[in-house]
Image (cartoon, rainbow, N blue to C red):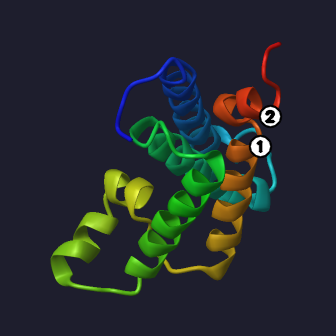
């Protein structure tokens, strides 16, 4: 289940690109006059896609649908974790790393954006595409 495959390369590359895209969107989205909804929820969708790709890196022999469900569980768990507050955790959430990793405020809309990002990552997953279009 945790065995490296030839699919790892594309997942690593895509994970890196999604992270870069998300950081660029959050940093320059408003300066580029992109609408709030694109910057806020586009970043959340990219975060969901990143979770999918990270799970795909670690559970290489799982079907994309299983990876998607696992990623959605993780993403929703992180969102629900925002409802838990302690002084040290709230202080971490105020840092850039804390905001990017855990977020600051609970939002049901974020869960929808995560699901969209995860669905998009699953749809374009090289492993899924290879399984549905075998060479022959």
Q: Nearer the viewer, residue 131 or 16?
A: 131
Q: Name the residue under label 1.
A: 123
Q: What element carries label 1?
A: helix
| 127 sits to left or right of 47 | right
Locate the N terminus and report the quarter of the image it occupies. Answer: top left
Q: What is the quadrant of residue 87 in the picture?
A: bottom left
The picture places residue 48, in percent across and down from the top left corner, at: 59, 54
If you read the primary sequence from the N terminus, does the residue marked by circle 2 or circle 1 appear first? Answer: 1
Q: Can residue 85 be seen in this view?
A: yes
The picture places residue 35, in percent across and down from the top left corner, at: 81, 55
Q: Measuring 70% from the left and 60% from the top, which residue is drawn there?
A: 41
| 27 sits to left or right of 116 | left
Q: Name the residue under label 2.
A: 132
Q: What is the quadrant of residue 134 in the picture?
A: top right
Q: Measuring 36% from the left and 52% from the top, which residue is drawn there?
A: 96
Q: Give the number of callouts.
A: 2
Q: Is residue 104 visible?
A: no
| 1 sits to left or right of 125 | left
The picture places residue 78, in percent across and down from the top left corner, at: 43, 70
The picture places residue 27, in percent across and down from the top left corner, at: 57, 41
* Picture layout, residue 94 above or below residue 8: below
Q: Which of 64 and 43 is in front in this view?
A: 64
* Picture layout, residue 40 above or below residue 109: above
């Amino acid at each position: 289940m945790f065995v490296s495959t030839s699919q790892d390369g594309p997942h690593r590359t895509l994970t890196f690109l999604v992270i870069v895209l998300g950081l660029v969107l959050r940093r320059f989205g408003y300066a580029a006059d992109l609408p709030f909804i694109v910057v806020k929820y586009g970043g959340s969708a990219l975060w969901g896609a990143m979770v999918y790709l990270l799970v795909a890196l670690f559970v290489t022999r799982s079907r994309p649908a299983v990876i998607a469900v696992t990623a959605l569980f993780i993403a929703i768990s992180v969102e629900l974790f925002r409802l838990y507050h302690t002084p040290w955790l709230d202080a971490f959430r105020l840092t850039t790393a804390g905001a990017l990793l855990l977020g600051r405020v609970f939002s049901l809309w974020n869960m929808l954006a995560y699901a969209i990002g995860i669905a998009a990552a699953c749809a374009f997953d090289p492993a899924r595409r290879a399984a549905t279009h075998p060479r022959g």
